[in-house]
Amino acid sequence: MADKPKPSMRYPLGEHENERILSRTGRKLDDLTLENVRAGQVAPDDFTIHPDTLRAQADIAEQAGFAQLAANLRRAAELASIPNEKVLAVYEALRPYRLNYEQLLALADELEREYDAHENARLVREAAEAYKARGLV
């Protein structure tokens, strides 16, 4: 049996890859301290996670045999680049009876087209099919 390839980053990332971890705004993990918050040197947006960090975590999870966790982290990486208002709208749209089948498919198309969020689009399409089969749209 062949050995699994090693992930490009080691878990936990905060301990082993501290210098490589950046926030979505480009701040290093070491910059995100209470002292810097008090001094006004970091802003709330500096505490948002970078999609590459989530992808690295997904790779590690997959290597460890946690396929579902890896898929969730990859979807999160896509969502990290989508405006918060849109993420909340998608969340609301996925509640039963909120949108009809065609509207859910249009939302999936929008996620792919506007945000390059293919994994999330696939999830919305799966939800649309499940909702349709169960009469929840």
Image (spheres, grey):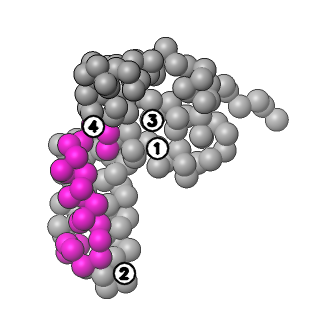
Task: Check whether the beta carbons of the residues at disc 2 and disc 4 lie within 8 A of each other.
Answer: no
Residue identified by numbered label 3: 54
- Which residue occupies the foreground of this view, 70 or 83? 83
- Asked whether residue 85 is in view, the answer is yes
- Asked whether residue 8 is in view, the answer is no
The tag on residue 45 is none
The tag on residue 133 is 2
Check disc 3 and report its element: helix, strand or loop.
Answer: helix
* Mark 2 vs mark 4: in front: 4
What range is drawn magenta here? 79-101
Q: Quadrant of residue 100?
A: bottom left
**Residue under the image location 34 percent in, 31 percent down:** 47
78 on left or right of 11: left
**Mark 1–mark 3 distance (CA, rounded to whole Å):** 6 Å
Residue closest to the far top: 19
Tag 3 or tag 1, which sits nearer the N-term? 3
100 on left or right of 96: left
Residue identified by numbered label 1: 73
Task: Check whether the beta carbons of the residues at disc 3 and disc 2 lie within 8 A of each other.
Answer: no
Within-10-Å neighbours for mark 4: few <14, some 14–19, many 20+:
some
**Mark 2–mark 4 distance (CA, rounded to whole Å):** 31 Å
| Amino acid type of the residue tagged 2 in the rendering | Ala
Residue 51 is covered by the magenta coloring: no
* Mark 2 vs mark 1: in front: 1
Task: Check whether the beta carbons of the residues at disc 1 and disc 3 lie within 8 A of each other.
Answer: yes
Residue closest to the far bottom: 135
**Mark 2–mark 1 distance (CA, rounded to whole Å):** 27 Å
Tag 2 or tag 3, which sits nearer the N-term? 3
**Mark 1–mark 4 distance (CA, rounded to whole Å):** 13 Å
Tag 1 or tag 2, which sits nearer the N-term? 1
Within-10-Å neighbours for mark 3: few <14, some 14–19, many 20+:
many
Tag 4 or tag 2, which sits nearer the N-term? 4
